Amino acid sequence: MTFDIGQFSGECACGETHKLATREIIIESGAISGFAGLADRLELGDGAVVVCDDNTRFCAERIAEILGRRMHRTRLACLSAKDLHADEHAVALLDGMLPPDAGWLVAAGDGTIHDTTRFVAKERGTPFVAFPTAAAVDAYVSATSAMTWHGYKVTAPAAAPVAVVADTDIFSSAPYRLTASGLGEALGKYTSLADWKVASLVTGEPYCERIASRIGEAADAVRAEMPDIRRGGRDGCERLMYTLLLSGTAMQLCGSSRPASGAEHHLSHLWELEVINPRLGALHGEKVGIGAIIVLERYKDLLKSGALASDRASPVYGGLPTRLLRAKFGDHYGNIVAENTPDPLESVSPDALLAALPEIREIVAGLPDPAALAKQMEDAGCKTTLREIGLGDGILRDSLELSPFVRARLTLQRLSSMLPPRGAAL
Ligand SMILES: [Zn+2]
Ligand SMILES: [Zn+2]
């Protein structure tokens, strides 16, 4: 399907002039065979190195062969898939594998291969082309890398791809667990978009209605296609890949992950820190999908309990709960405090929050019903419960309480601590 790269370019009603570094996005069957033409069109020149792991080596070899036919000298850099993470080890390994005359890179693989490649591409000042082999995450087209750096999760500046080539024949036949994980990632946009809008209402943070509504529509389209995606249907899988790439494009346009990452991602990031839980084997989108269901339930509860009612006492904020954070985050406490300095809640005026409540109630009322979404996800083979990723239900309360502090980003969940409970709210 066509991805209109120009749809957000230029001046926008939001006041920004949006600009994309990515020049082409191709999503179609057989897209891989267009690699040589793409290299010519974008004048990428000679000396491509295709980065892959053992699982995606077959794609990398085909790309090298296609480029080789047009006299493009191409080499492979194949990382071992075992224990591969986007961290300082993978970066050093890839950097050591690249020849000094590497002209441009292709990331042929999943999110880890992309995060590692884009980080190295930025450091070396080398262009790179994204070749996602599964519709699993939305970061393929973003300009930041989600890295683990000496044990701590960071969002590192990285290169945006000059082009994305997504071959439906390849990503629609990826192991289904990856596709199901991509569904969780795509459906997580409901809560991330709600958090973005809420934050903009309360603090005046930049918000783009055009970008937000396109992502919202794309998430709705994915939701409608879930039975087809479950069957491995190409149209449904293309719709999913389109939505993930659109979300990544939005991150690039906004210069941050704001449109694509809200309270549902904060839950995932908290579990990745392993401060209240053991190491999980779950995929990113599995955690995000479950996070989205939890956050939807939480937001609907806020609405039901009257915590978002306007006829209440003025909201109050008591500052960072440092004792709690020190007790729960342990060795990560210093990082958590640094992340939350300045504290995003301190910029929130109680009056502005009170004034925004009617619109916040509307936003929450417009969110999908969590039980209905969970059922659809379950039918589509997605993980939907904490237990399925190795967490007990007892972790829920701590997860909701602590996760807002893993990122200095305003979400409704973080704001809710300024709204003392009327009923059952935390
Ligand atoms: Zn994500
Ligand atoms: Zn805009």
Image (tube, rainbow, N blue to C red):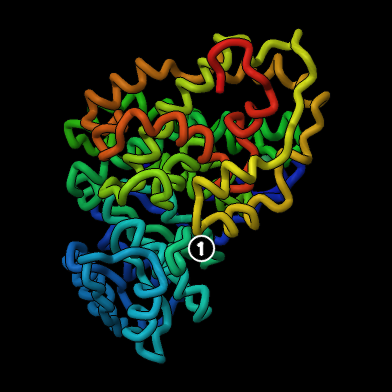
Identify whether 223 is placed above or below 98. Answer: above
Question: Is any atom of residue 2 visible in this view?
Answer: no
* Residue at mark 1: 160
Asked if the residue at label 1 sits under 8 Å from ligand 1, the reply is no
Query: Residue at the spot x=30%, y=33% of the render?
Result: 392
**Residue 3 found in image quarter:** top left
Residue 73 spot, x, y in % from top left: 30, 85
Q: Residue furthest bottom?
A: 100
Q: Residue at x 42, y 43 (%)?
A: 268
| Residue that appears at 58% across and 30% down | 413
User: Is residue 158 shown above or below 268?
Assistant: below
Quarter of the rendering occupied by the C terminus: top right
Q: Is residue 309 left or right of residue 103?
A: right
Q: Amino acid at mark 1?
A: Ala
Left or right: 8, with 264 as reference point: right
The quadrant holding residue 187 is top left
